[in-house]
């Protein structure tokens, strides 16, 4: 256990994961609070979709610039500024709902602003892991950070509904503002070197081009980003649109809550496994397990028993979490440090750019094809795309680096 948690010996890493876990907790509460806030203000399901879509669109549009800035400016500054800004915007939003001057349009505008703030810091935050621990402790750091963020998100989902019911949407969003303030404080305590490139700087467009060339230089990288695009194009609507309808109609509405809880349990177990399991060909193993995600939509489509759906949900979460940890570790160990934030931004854009389209098209297509039939198609595409990636020798043969262990540096207060 000591080796599995070795990254937590380092002060900077502890502050990093405390900040990311804090904001992850709040960000899991806000979607629930936001949904009821829109409805309480008289908004419709379409209005809610527009509010959520404003955040998603702003995030996708801005994240590439976040990657460029994360490789130009001190990453600590990007994270600290974004968290402080998000704390202020969420506090304003909470106040508007508590006092009573909030509107649906205001929720959309502030949501878009929060999407921009999140996108500006996300690549820097992911790249920061590498700067807080020595190379030999990076596997422990990646797995530990992922596990704590997933655990915090699970708690957020669990308490979000309770907070809204007991205190109201405004106070629940106020909790999110507090978590961002805590994150900003944690980031301000980081003592990492400002690894900013020296010399004359190229234009932002040129920097983006350098990031794109770095992605294209690694076939395993662009291939699995493409796979992630297919995953989110098909699965986003299957979970958000079809899942509640199919599972709710078949087994009762509470069953969908159980399915989501079981999915998160799979994430947590996968994170725990990754703390201990260090396969040499981790990307190969992760991609194989990624194919397990197909079992959830297939189970929803064909099963007449809830327990089978729950098993599918668990295996989906488990496989996806293991893949995510090994994927992140592969990027951390194989991408040039000065291009890391830009690569993470291309990863985010490539993975999520098609998700809004999938959300918009799932309903109309499923009505024509049939709900169960479309869930089968979704499952087959998810499983086949993951297995197809294994035909690449670059995916199969990429090995985890195992640097020589060095004694840990003294932990400062």
Image (tube, grey):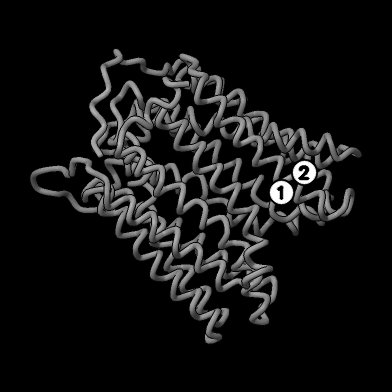
Query: Which disc is residue 238 wearing?
Result: 1
Check the picture and name the quadrant holding the C terminus: top left
Q: Earlier in the sequence, mark 2 or mark 1?
A: 1
For the point 77% across and 54% down, the residue is 244
Q: Is residue 365 left or right of residue 279?
A: right
Q: From the viewer's perspective, is residue 170 above or below residue 175?
A: below
Query: Which disc is residue 220 wearing?
Result: none
List x then y, in percent, for residue 373: 82, 43
Q: Is residue 34 left or right of residue 365?
A: left
On the question of residue 212 being in view, the answer is: no
Q: Secondary structure at mark 1?
A: helix
List x then y, in percent, for residue 270: 59, 30
**Which is nearer the eye, 392 or 271?**
271
List x then y, in percent, for residue 378: 71, 41
For the point 46% across and 47% down, the residue is 21
Q: Circle 1: is it few (<14), some (14-19), or many (20+) Cα within 10 Å? A: many
Q: Secondary structure at mark 2?
A: helix
Q: From the viewer's perspective, is residue 127 above or below residue 6?
A: below
Residue matched to label 2: 375
Does the CB distance between marks 2 and 1 fall below 8 Å? yes
Q: From the viewer's perspective, is residue 184 above or below residue 38?
A: above
């Amino acid at each position: 256990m000591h080796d599995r948690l070795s990254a937590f010996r380092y002060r900077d890493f502890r502050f990093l994961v405390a900040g990311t876990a804090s904001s992850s907790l709040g960000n899991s509460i806000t979607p629930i609070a936001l949904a009821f806030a829109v409805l309480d203000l008289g908004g419709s399901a379409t209005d809610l979709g527009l509010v959520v879509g404003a955040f998603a669109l702003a995030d996708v549009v801005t994240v590439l610039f976040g990657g460029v800035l994360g490789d130009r400016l001190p990453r600590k500054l990007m994270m600290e500024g974004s968290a402080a800004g998000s704390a202020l915007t969420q506090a304003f939003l909470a106040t508007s709902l508590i006092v009573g001057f909030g509107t649906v349009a205001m929720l959309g505008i502030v949501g878009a602003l929060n999407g921009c703030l999140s996108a500006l810091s996300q690549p820097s935050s992911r790249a920061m892991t590498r700067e807080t621990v020595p190379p030999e402790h990076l596997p422990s750091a990646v797995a530990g950070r992922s596990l704590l963020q997933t655990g915090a998100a699970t708690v957020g989902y669990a308490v979000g509904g309770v907070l809204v019911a007991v205190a109201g949407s405004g106070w629940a969003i106020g909790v999110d503002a507090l978590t961002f303030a805590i994150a900003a404080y944690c980031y301000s305590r980081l003592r990492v070197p400002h690894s900013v490139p020296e010399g004359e700087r190229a234009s932002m467009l040129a920097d983006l081009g350098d990031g794109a060339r770095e992605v294209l230089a690694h076939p395993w990288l662009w291939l699995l980003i493409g796979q992630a695009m297919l995953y989110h194009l098909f699965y986003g609507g299957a979970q958000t649109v079809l899942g509640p309808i199919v599972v709710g109609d078949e087994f009762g509405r509470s069953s969908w809550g159980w399915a989501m809880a079981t999915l998160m349990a799979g994430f947590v177990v996968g994170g725990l496994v990754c703390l201990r399991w260090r396969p040499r060909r981790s990307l190969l193993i992760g991609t194989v397990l990624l194919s397990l995600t197909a079992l959830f939509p297939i189970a929803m489509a064909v099963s007449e028993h809830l327990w089978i759906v729950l098993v599918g949900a668990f295996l989906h979460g488990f496989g996806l979490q293991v893949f995510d940890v090994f994927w992140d570790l592969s990027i951390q160990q194989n991408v040039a440090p000065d291009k890391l934030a830009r690569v993470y931004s291309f990863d985010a854009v490539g993975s999520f750019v098609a998700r809004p389209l999938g959300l918009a098209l799932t309903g109309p297509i499923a009505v024509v094809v049939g709900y169960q039939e479309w869930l089968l198609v979704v499952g087959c595409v998810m499983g086949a795309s993951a297995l197809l990636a294994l035909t690449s020798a670059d995916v199969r043969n990429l090995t985890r680096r195992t640097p020589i262990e060095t004694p840990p540096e003294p932990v400062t207060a």
